[in-house]
Amino acid sequence: MTDKSALLVVDIQIDFCPGGALSVPRGDEIIPVLNRYIERFHRAGLPIFATRDWHPAKTSHFKAFGGTWPVHCVQGSEGAQFHPGLMLPDNAIIISKGMDPNRDDYSALHGADPNGIPLPEVLREFGIERIFIGGLTTDYCVRESTLEGLRQGFRVTVLTDAVRGVDLKPGDSVRALQEIRAAGADTTTFETLRLY
Ligand code: VGL
Ligand code: ZN
């Protein structure tokens, strides 16, 4: 049990919080919880990645162009900013995702750092073997990033007290958690957190 760990904080952006363009019910409730995880990882000297949904103005992800969602998290817009309550350390690494105008892509593993280096490469450079994932949304980005992380050979732990879902269909988030467990992900809450 010596796998090196990283924290992945997913999409804590104004548009996903109450009052935002694609607000997730009670999405802001997890921010104080995530701040505790962030502090814990930071003090342990472990890297912290913060993803942002970062869409071009025209993308097939949006209803207006054939997709599912209202316009949200457009690159450079106010709604795409991190929620002001999120306390990221200065050395947190920002990962942008969802930039392809022709693809509905939720996985943070398809995102890239400010130098354009894909997240999986950055993780491997850090020697990361286990990713702890919390944030928004349980049924899309958290789900897909977890499944993709497992496929790429990382171990993944989902922070169940620090995720919230959209639930377009009732029960989507519950099903997403069942699915990621069946795929081999671990789950934890802050009280039972064990860093490897
Ligand atoms: C997401 C809905 C729309 C996500 C992104 O990152 O979970 N969900 N765009
Ligand atoms: Zn999006």
Image (spheres, rainbow, N blue to C red):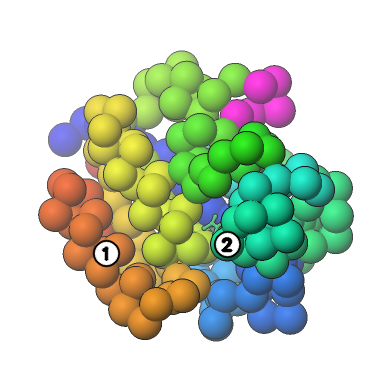
Residue at position x 52%, y 43% in the image = 105
Residue at position x 64%, y 75% in the image = 23
Say above or below: 140 vs 42.
Answer: below
Question: Residue 26's x, y, as percent?
Answer: 55, 82
The residue carrying mark 1 is 177
Residue at position x 47%, y 43% in the image = 107
Assign the magenta stretch its main secondary structure.
Answer: loop
Mark 2 and ligand 1: say if the CB distance to the nearest ligand atom is below 8 Å.
yes
- Residue 115 is a magenta residue: yes
* Residue 20 at least partly seen: yes
The residue carrying mark 2 is 68
Query: Residue flagged by tag 2: what amino acid is it?
Result: Thr
Q: Is residue 62 left or right of residue 178?
A: right
* Residues rendered magenta in the picture: 112-116
Question: Residue 169's x, y, as percent?
Answer: 39, 77
- Location of ligand 1 given as a quarter of the image: bottom right
- Residue 24 is a magenta residue: no
Say above or below: 184 vs 130.
Answer: below
| Residue extending furthest toward the right | 77
Q: Is residue 3 left or right of residue 34?
A: left
